[in-house]
């Protein structure tokens, strides 16, 4: 992973995959996650970020949306249960 320490990002697109961010600041950035590698963010500050999911991560969200909208109550329950599991400590 690429280590980014105490960097300041402003008005830019920041690829997250395979990056480690520590004590970084992001101002008006597009935070791009593709799901192709690990990400670490420790003690970072965000001001007006925009989060986007591309590639495999974007495909996963599209699939989940299709399940939620197209599988009736079973699909809705599956996606809601997935989000409940994400919230567990």
Image: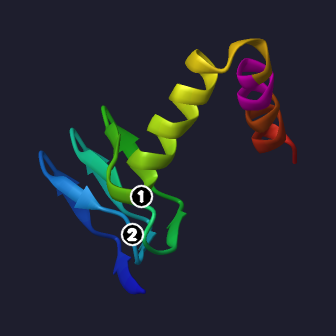
Which part of the image, by quadrant, shows the N terminus? bottom left
- Write the residue at 34% across / 71% down: 6
Question: To which residue does mark 2 refer?
Answer: 17
Which of the labelled discs sits on residue 56, or is there none? 1
Q: How many marks?
A: 2
Helix, strand or loop for disc 1 = helix
Residue farthest to the front, as pictured: 71
- Write the residue at 33% across / 56% down: 55
Reply above or below: 52 against 81: below
Reply above or below: 2 against 38: below
Helix, strand or loop for disc 2 = loop
Residue 27 image position (x, y, % from top left): 24, 43
Residue span colored magenta: 75-80
Q: CA distance from mark 2 to mark 1?
A: 11 Å
- Write the residue at 79% across / 21% down: 74
Q: Is residue 53 left or right of residue 38?
A: left
Q: Is residue 27 left or right of residue 58?
A: left
Residue 52 image position (x, y, % from top left): 33, 42
Name the one closer to the observer, 25 or 12: 12
- Mark 2 and mark 1 lie on one chain; the one further toward the N terminus is 2
């Amino acid at each position: 992973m690429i280590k980014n320490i105490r960097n300041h990002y402003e008005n830019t697109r920041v690829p997250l995959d395979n990056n480690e961010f520590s004590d970084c600041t992001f101002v008006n950035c597009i935070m791009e996650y593709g799901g192709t590698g690990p990400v670490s963010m420790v003690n970072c500050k965000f001001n007006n970020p925009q989060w986007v999911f591309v590639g495999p991560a974007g495909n996963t969200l599209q699939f989940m949306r299709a399940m939620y909208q197209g599988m009736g109550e079973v699909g809705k329950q599956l996606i809601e249960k997935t989000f409940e599991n994400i919230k567990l400590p």
